[in-house]
Amino acid sequence: MLLTLPALVFVTVFVLAPLVFAVYMSFTNWPLIGSYELIGLGNYAAIASDPVFWKSVGYTVLYTAIVTLPILVLGYVLAVVVRANRRFSTVFRTVFFVPYVIGLTTLSFLMVLEAQPGSGMVNIVLETLGITDGTTAWLADGPLATGLICVMIVWAVSGLTMVLLMGGMQGIPRDVYESAEMDGASWWQRERSITIPMLRRTIAMSLVISVIGSLLAFTQFYVLTRGGPGTDTQTVVMYIYQRGFVQLQLGAASALSIVLVVVVGLVTAAQFRLLREKD
């Protein structure tokens, strides 16, 4: 108990206490400045008739659906490339993992520069390939901005999936592969019948992390588009931020946050149930 006490204190002060306080705030009309009063379930009732919120929910789900599978597939491919102790494998691991270490904030600010019409590297490369004329305003169009952000996220986050899957792959006994090779199994047959089944838990964890991160996406959209043009790229967390710190409605923002916490918890539980190992 003494050894776990510091962690318990940390979690209580920085997680549990703020969560309880947020639940209390969600039952009030708490402004950022000024007095407040209890309004019961008023904030929760207003959510059902909030079209902007439901639009942000739909966009967040679409974004999550677009990036989840590519992150897993690219991470798996990268893990296959670097899992063996071949020459330069350590260098490749570092190169593939560096974007995740740099962080989304830095990558997003770099992408703001590289996506500029005429001068950004994105347009220069695509113009060289003959795909565009080099003047595309990527961040001024909803679908284009979404596509650009999705590509950036897949590139940035797949390194984490690579590390998780590589650790799982290295934990599979070598004699299992040797037995399969002696039976004449091809590389693909070994991957399909040995690697993927024995990585089920690691794949499940990678998917859970990826989905939760996508449902809570904020940084890349705040830096690159601020939810625009209009509300075309506004995620749920961005909408909560707008309600709380732009419109100064902390009570309503807290209610939205509690709903999001519940939804993310249910989605995570469903993922664990669907991806659990069968006896």
Image (cartoon, rainbow, N blue to C red):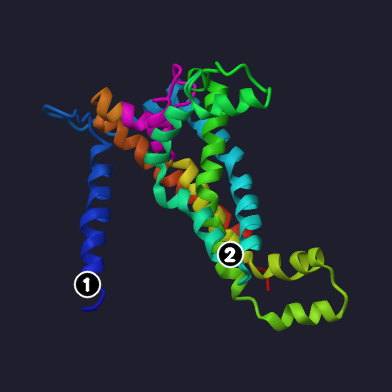
Mark 2 crowdedness (10 Å alpha carbons): few <14, some 14-19, many ≥20: few
- Region in magenta: 217-242
Residue 20, horizontal then vertical, whole percent: 25, 49
Instruction: Residue type at mark 1: give it.
Output: Leu
> Quadrant of the image for the N terminus?
bottom left
* Residue drawn where x is 23% and y is 62% of the image: 10
Q: Is residue 230 magenta?
A: yes
Q: CA distance from mark 2 to mark 1?
A: 43 Å
For disc 2, the marked residue is 88
SS class of the residue under badge 2? loop
In-image side of 164 versus 34 (left or right): right
Pick whichever of labels 2 and 1 is earlier in the sequence: 1
Crowdedness near tag 1: few (<14), some (14–19) or many (≥20) residues, C-alpha within 10 Å: few
Q: In the displayed structure, does residue 63 sit left or right of residue 84? A: left
Return the residue found at the far left.
34
When the figure is inspected, residue 204 is found, relative to residue 99, above or below; the finding is: below
Q: Position of residue 261 (x, y in %)?
A: 40, 45
Mark 2 residue type: Phe
The residue to which callout 1 is attached is 5
From the image, which quarter does the C terminus lie in? bottom right
